[in-house]
Every structure is written in structure tokens, then in C-alpha cells.
Amino acid sequence: MTASVHAEVKQVLYFWPHLQEAPAGAAHFGVQAQIFIGMVGADEVDSFDVLVCSPSWLASRHLLGTGSCSLVARSGA
């Protein structure tokens, strides 16, 4: 029998462009986040970098050639 592993989010850091958070309910936004996840009770963590954005923000960055994307997932697909 394999022992189960329980992980938890230890910390989340947000990096807003121009150091300004998008207003609540914004339809056009993009934010980078770094998520630190580790086993419950341990100090060691793995770091995951993610980009969370609206479809319009992604389209504007792609059309301007100022960003890259390796995975795009549609909501509800």
C-alpha cells in the first residue's frame, strides 16, 4: 500500500503590470503569480509560475507580439 501525500499552498505572490492591481470586475487584465506548494508540515516547496488573464488581454498581447503562450484553455470546454 502506498502512503498518501498531502500538499498545501504555502504562499502566493502576485506581480501586477505597472504595479497596479486590476479593479474588481475588470474584463481586461493580466497578472503573473508564483505559487509555492509543499507537503503539509514541511518547509520545502516547489514553485509554479502562472499567468492568469482575460481572453481580451491574451489576444491583445498576442497580436502585439509582446508575449508568448504555450497553453490556452477555454472555460467550460
Image (cartoon, rainbow, N blue to C red):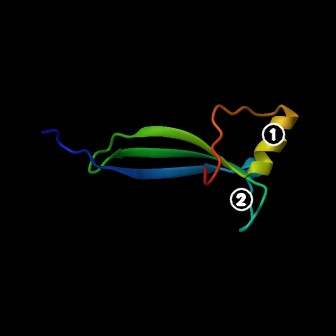
Drawn side of residue 7 relative to residue 4, left or right: right
Foreground pick, 28 / 41: 28
Pinpoint residue 8: horizontal percent, then vertical percent.
Answer: 36, 52
Which residue position is annotated with label 1? Answer: 61
- Mark 1: which secondary structure? helix
Asked which secondary structure carries label 2, the reply is loop
Q: Foreground: 75 or 56?
A: 75
Residue farthest to the left, as pictured: 1
Which residue is drawn at the image coordinates 41% and 51% (left, top)?
Answer: 10
Image location of residue 22, percent across then percent down = 74, 60
Q: CA distance from mark 2 to mark 1?
A: 18 Å
- Position of 8 compared to 77: left or right? left
Q: Residue at x 71, y 59 (%)?
A: 21
Q: Residue furthest front?
A: 77
| Residue appearing at x 61%, y 49% in the figure | 77
Image spot of residue 20 (x, y percent): 75, 56
The amino acid type found where label 1 is placed reads Arg
Quadrant in the picture for residue 3: top left
The mark total stands at 2
Question: Residue 36's spot in the image, x, y percent?
Answer: 45, 45
Marker disc for residue 21:
2
The mark closer to the camera, 2 or 1, is 1
Query: Considering only order in the chain, which callout, 1 or 2, is on the residue closer to the N terminus?
Result: 2
